[in-house]
Amino acid sequence: AFQDPHLTTFVCVCIPEFLSIYETERLVQELSKFGIDAHNIVVNQVLFPEKDAEELGEWFEANKNKLPKEAKEICGKMMARKRMQDKYIGQCFDLYGDDFHVVLMPLLDFEVRGVNKLLEFSENLVDPVDLEES
C-alpha cells in the first residue's frame, strides 16, 4: 500500500534554510529507495513569497532614510533573511522544479490553531502563490 501512489503519498515540509533543504533531499532519496511517492514539497514560513528580495530591496533603498533607526534595523534584518530564503528557494526549485509539486507557504503573523485558522492556512495550499504572475 505504501508503494502505490494512488493510495499513499508523502508530503515533505521544509523551511527555506540550508539544513532543512538538505534533510528534505535526504528524505526524498530514502523514500524513493523504498518506492514511496514523495513528489510534493511544501516550503513553509516564506517571507513574502509573491515578491523577491530584489523588489523588496528596491523599496527599502528608496525609503530607508524616511524610517526611524529601529525600523531600518528591523527591515535590514528582514532583507537579509529574505535574500537567504530566496537563495534556498531557488535551490529547491532547481532540485525539484520539473518533477515535483513545490508550494511556497507564507510566514504568517498568527499561530495556526483552531478550525478557522486551519481553514485560512489551507487556502494557501489549495490556491498557492503563482510565482509567474507576481
Image (cartoon, rainbow, N blue to C red):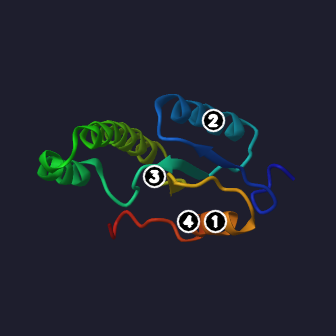
User: Disc 2 designates what residue?
Assistant: 29
Residue 87's quadrant in the figure? Answer: top left
- Whichever of labels 2 and 3 marks the residue nearer the N terminus, that label is 2
- Whichever of labels 4 and 3 marks the residue nearer the N terminus, that label is 3
Q: Which mark is residue 97?
A: 3
* Disc 1 element: helix
Image position, residue 134 (x, y; %): 32, 66
Horizontally, is 59 left or right of 117 in the view? left
Q: What kind of residue is marked 4?
A: Asn
User: Disc 4 designates what residue?
Assistant: 124
Circles 4 and 3: CB atoms closer than 8 Å: no
- Whichever of labels 1 and 2 marks the residue nearer the N terminus, that label is 2
User: Disc 1 designates what residue?
Assistant: 122
* Disc 2 element: helix
Circles 1 and 4: CB atoms closer than 8 Å: yes
Image position, residue 105 (x, y; %): 52, 56
Q: Residue furthest top?
A: 19
